[in-house]
Image: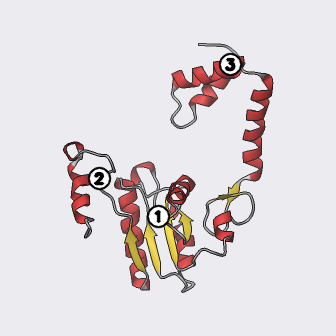
Amino acid sequence: MYEGAIQDLIDELGRLPGVGPKSAQRIAFHVLSADPADVNRLAGALRKVKELVRFCTSCYNVAESDTCRICRDPRRTDEVICVVEEPKDVVAIERTGEFRGRYHVLGGAINPLEGIGPDSLRIRELMTRLGGGEVRELILATDPNTEGEATATYLALMVKPMGIAVTRLASGLPVGGDLEYADEITLGRAFEGRRAV
């Protein structure tokens, strides 16, 4: 539709996840009309993240050094590892303030349709960590969808023979939700995960 640099920017923005063609166009024109100092800050932040950010050598969370701040924290217990799909899941769990163990980021979930099998994830590295003998519980915090469930089931089958307790995050009704709008699977899991009051 447009020519030259503006179309190149729209095309590149459109390749970002969750950014459709109209959003890409809107962002491109915002950049075009923005103050040059703001655009330079954005460009600098993009360059900096590619230069400085890497994956933690222990848990594979994002870090700016060999290990992330969570792995460096001596107050955390090494006896519990929470397995998540992506670094953004670590942030979500950390916001609760409820978990004081360590993490392991798989880098995705098993999805045969996309060509992602167990060998595509950091499962081998997880098994190496579990082989040290310190871990007593493995919490599976993969997404409650088909891929996340397949990944959790696969990990549970791999880990159970090691004598490590394997648990799964509870799933069910959200706070403020209405029963009439809950699907059968969510409502069924809410019944399975009920607890005494």
Q: Regarding mark 1 in the picture, which secondary structure is present there?
A: helix
How far apart marks 3 and 1 lie (CA) works out to 41 Å
**Along the viewing direction, whichever of 14 and 69 lies nearer the viewer:** 69
Mark 3: amino acid: Ile
Please count the marks in the image: 3
Disc 2: which residue: 173
How far apart marks 1 and 2 lie (CA) works out to 30 Å
- Mark 1: few/some/many CA within 10 Å (<14, 14-19, 20+): some
**Along the viewing direction, whichever of 133 and 153 lies nearer the viewer:** 133
* 158 relative to 112, above or below: below
The residue positioned farthest toward the front in the image shown: 197
- Percent x, y of residue 111: 42, 54
Q: Earlier in the sequence, mark 1 or mark 2?
A: 1
Q: Which mark is residue 118?
A: 1
* 114 relative to 136, above or below: above
Side of 4 relative to 89 (left or right): right
- Percent x, y of residue 175: 33, 50
Disc 3: which residue: 6
Q: Nearer the viewer, mark 3 or mark 1?
A: 3
Q: Residue at x 29, y 46 (%)?
A: 177
Please identify the quarter of the rendering in which residue 6 is found.
Answer: top right
Q: Regarding mark 2 in the picture, which secondary structure is present there?
A: loop
- Percent x, y of residue 103: 55, 67
